[in-house]
Amino acid sequence: PATLTVSYTVADNYGGTGNITLAAASLVVPPPPVTLPVTENFSSGMGNWTIVNDSGTASSWAVVSGALRQENRVESVNAFDQSSHKGTYAYYTAGTSLSNYRFSTDAIFLGAGLADDIGIMFRYQNNNNYYRLSMNSRFGFTRLEKKTGGVFTPLAVNARGYNSGELLRFTIDLNGSSIQVTVNDDPLFAVNDSSLSTGTVALYTQDKASFDNVVIHIPENTATVTLATPLARDVIVDNAINATAISTNIPGGGGVEFLLDSVTSILDNAAPYSNTFSGLITGDHTVEAIVRDAGNVELARDTNTLVGVGGDSYIAAGDSITNGSGDNYATDNLSSRMLGFQGYETNLSVLLEGNQGKPVIVYNEGIGGDESVDTAFNRIGSILARHSNSNKALVMLGTNDALALVPSGSGCTGTACNGTYKGNMQSLINTMTAAGKTVYTALPPPVFGSGGPIPFADPATATLNTNYISAYNSVVLSELTGRQLGPDLYSYFLGAGQNRFSLFSDVWHPNALGYTAIAALWYNTLNPATPAALPFVLDSLVPSTTTPYVKQNLLETGDTYYVDAAYILTAIPAALNNGRWIMAANGDTGNTSASYINFSTDRPVTVYIAYDGGAAALPGWMSTFTSTGLTLSTTDPFSPTLNLYSQSFSAGPVTLGGNSAAGSSGADSHYVVIVVAN
């Protein structure tokens, strides 16, 4: 701002005069209007951009190899506004007066491990007022939302994130209240919203990411159309489709044709463009919106496939277990409707849809670190707003309550339940049922330790389980009202005579195979008349409850395969697909025991041993194994290639000896076991 000194004279009716001087007044000169188009390839640095950190964690933005990159992970358990996400962003400083424009950019998520938010913002005015498009593969979503007056409001959502390493081309078309969203040339969302009419653009992320080829130019002058409803791959609970479309530049006499399954058609000649298709059969349908001129010539088209009708739309609400922490196996988190990297939700939706004969989608709304009080009183309002058309909810909470020593509230009534697990859960159930959801509540799984890698010597007698988790499960079983009973996760992982710590990635979270079991347990609760077989797991796995705490898991390329080393798998032969991997300790390479790993199976199996390809001789106990001619490739510099040997076993016990047992010579690393059911 400039400083302006103003002097003026005041005269009265009697000839008197006096001078008044206003000194040091601030004169704010708005920036000149931006001339479009604007292109930014960051060849001159990032001087045109202003950085905002909204998550409470410092970011690190810089131009690297001709692209704007953010190098720090800023996501945390604190990076939430109710259930909306917060991160860091760079906004184009000179664009505050922009109104109608097309904005596009290329983006790649570069973070390792958790696949959190990446996206763009538009009509950005300040940190309390903007529109935002974000994608996330940890939760598995693409969201369009607005923030006005500091409050987030959902505008559109689906259950698909991005693929690992995928180049994302984001495009936003703004024309008055019309907002059209395209990702990789696929029209994704469209809304009419007039909350914000001006503002600049921004690049948004929660982790390492790269942005390039930013273009802002005048709106398209040709006809465009995007279906606002129904969304592709989504599920509608009833048997009708309310089709609506956002279209621009329709010539006089033209309109939008709505086409269902290439058969049923109706033309709407007046905005807002819409049509309802009723009495539809349960299943998937295709809906198209076609712009036609007065002569019936097609000018633009948007097609949404896999529109599920007459199905179930679930919300999965809970903590990091619901979110899928510890699930390393992305392969089973992709379906025709859903794309994420972790959790039980995709597995469950596939089971339900495959066996119920109707479309199903399960939205992952689990938030790490949440106790029952957080979900009930902070998250649920925004979650319900995002999924107002869902009809069912799956709730599992209790692990963090136990760690925080939250009283169960068993037997309490009225205000005496305030601050208890029972009171929080009942409030959550009441809120969800009032919103029209059928609520299912699971019995939370055991806590295998209080923190750190070492579990309780006897988790069944640990105070966190006896005084808290078991008490919570008693409340879920017999004291909560207005809910349907979900699966008993406690009994599966720590039932009578059962300890399945081998299905946990740490003392609190299941691993990929554990989440597969959770999906099946949920399925059987939802379909008691036609239960599915639980996934194949190894029983009585030793040593899984004592050091070195070996695990059984599902693995894929890019995963670690020891419990104590960070080497990863780089190539896996197809013969091992869907195998159960026993993750041993590389520190036990020198073990000479005749009986090191023991387990039993309930079906015939093929046991594969991946042994150091540089070894001079195999241990004697492997004399009955046959070379397959196949290999595993790893990043272990001492044993980059592991040769695969196999042997078939009938149902029953299996014993495997130590890596350096009698007869062996020259092995630098521990063997890997993969068990494939026959």
Image (cartoon, rainbow, N blue to C red):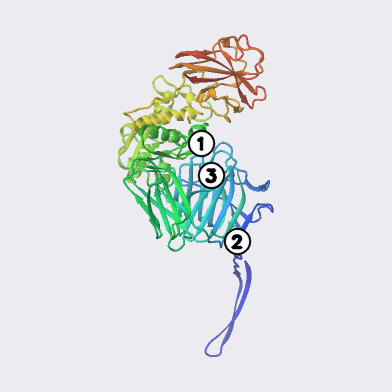
Picture coordinates of residue 4, whole percent (x, y): 63, 72
Picture coordinates of residue 609, whole percent (x, y): 56, 17
Callout 1 environment at 10 Å: few (<14), some (14 to 19), or many (20+)?
A: many
Picture coordinates of residue 464, whole percent (x, y): 43, 29
Q: CA distance from mark 3 to mark 2?
A: 29 Å
Evaluate whether residue 639 shows in this view: yes
Residue, disc 3: 117
Q: How many marks?
A: 3
Query: What amino acid is at disc 2?
Result: Leu
Task: Report helix, strand or loop for mark 1.
Answer: loop
Displayed quadrant of residue 566? top right
Determine contact: label 3, label 2, CB under 8 Å. Answer: no
Which tag, 3 or 1, sits closer to the chain's start? 3
Res. 341 mark: 1
Most distant residue in the front direction? 295
Most distant residue in the bottom direction? 14
**Residue 472 shown left or right of residue 3 in the figure:** left
Picture coordinates of residue 367, whole percent (x, y): 46, 40
Query: What amino acid is at disc 1?
Result: Phe
Residue, disc 2: 36
Compare residues 134 and 339 and report the one nearer the observer. Answer: 339
Residue at 32% in and 29% down = 528
Task: Report helix, strand or loop for mark 2.
Answer: loop
Which tag, 2 or 1, sits closer to the chain's start? 2
